[in-house]
Image (cartoon, rainbow, N blue to C red):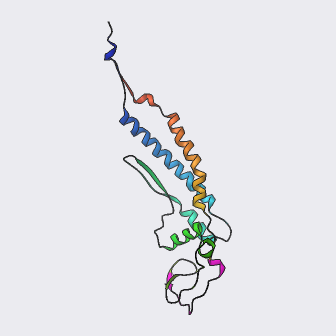
Amino acid sequence: MINFTSNKISLDTNRLVADLKTQFHHVLIGVSNQLIQIMRQEIPEGNLPGKPEWRSKLESDLAIVSSSMINDIIETQVGAPYMSDTWEYVRGMLIEYGSGSEVGNPPIQSRPGEEVWNDNLDGKHISNAKSSYLLPPAFNQQGSAWIENAMLRVRPLFNETMTNVLKNFDIKKHIIVQRG
């Protein structure tokens, strides 16, 4: 007589989860690289917002800034590695969000005796303006929402790619069969 109760099938969930995390991490890096390409396509051309050379620098600086897999969180951060309050950061914010009256803020104006960004947004200085006045219209610019547009474009790719990982995942190698 065969004792069927001594046969056991189990699932090695620790190995399964570890393998899935590793696959998802690799795929996330791939999708992040595709996001960088999409972001580069979304950076606006022409004269506004910002200057063409600012947008060109931003485009070339886009990269995966960090990638980690800690506990149950798998993460990549994509962008330009600019520290806040640097000229690169200020230019990037202008390209994304715009400035002044064009985005619902007060118009850009001179600020006598105060610390201000220079015309090229690559340094600050004490304003030498003698009085307060509105700066030319070019200082008030519409934003481009290029980051938001890129994120909208990459979302379906992300969903499709992650779904494919699950579809193609070989669960058989995580099943343990023990015969009695």
Q: Residue furthest right?
A: 46
Seen at 62% across and 78% down, the residue is 139
Whether residue 180 is visible to the viewer of this picture, yes or no, is no
Q: Does 66 sit left or right of 164 as displayed?
A: left
Q: Is residue 123 above or below residue 19?
A: below
Seen at 46% across and 70% down, the residue is 84
Whether residue 43 is visible to the viewer of this picture, yes or no, is yes
**Which one is in front, 102 or 40?**
102
Residue 126, image x, y percentages: 49, 87
Residue 114, image x, y percentages: 49, 86
Residue 150, image x, y percentages: 59, 56
Q: Does 166 sit left or right of 178 as displayed?
A: right
**Which one is in front, 136 or 100?**
100
Question: Does 77 appear in magenta?
Answer: no
Q: Quadrant of the C terminus?
A: top left
* Bounds of the magenta segment: 124-139
Residue 52, image x, y percentages: 63, 70
Q: Does 177 sit left or right of 27 as displayed?
A: left
Seen at 46% across and 41% down, the residue is 23
Q: Residue furthest top?
A: 1
**Which one is in front, 123 or 2?**
2
Give the image quarter of residue 4.
Answer: top left
Seen at 57% across and 55% down, the residue is 151
Question: What predominant SS class does the magenta segment belong to?
Answer: loop
Q: Quadrant of the N terminus?
A: top left
Query: What count of labels does the image hold?
Result: 0
Q: Does 57 sit left or right of 11 as displayed?
A: right
Q: Is residue 46 above or below residue 117?
A: above
**Which one is in front, 44 or 1?**
1
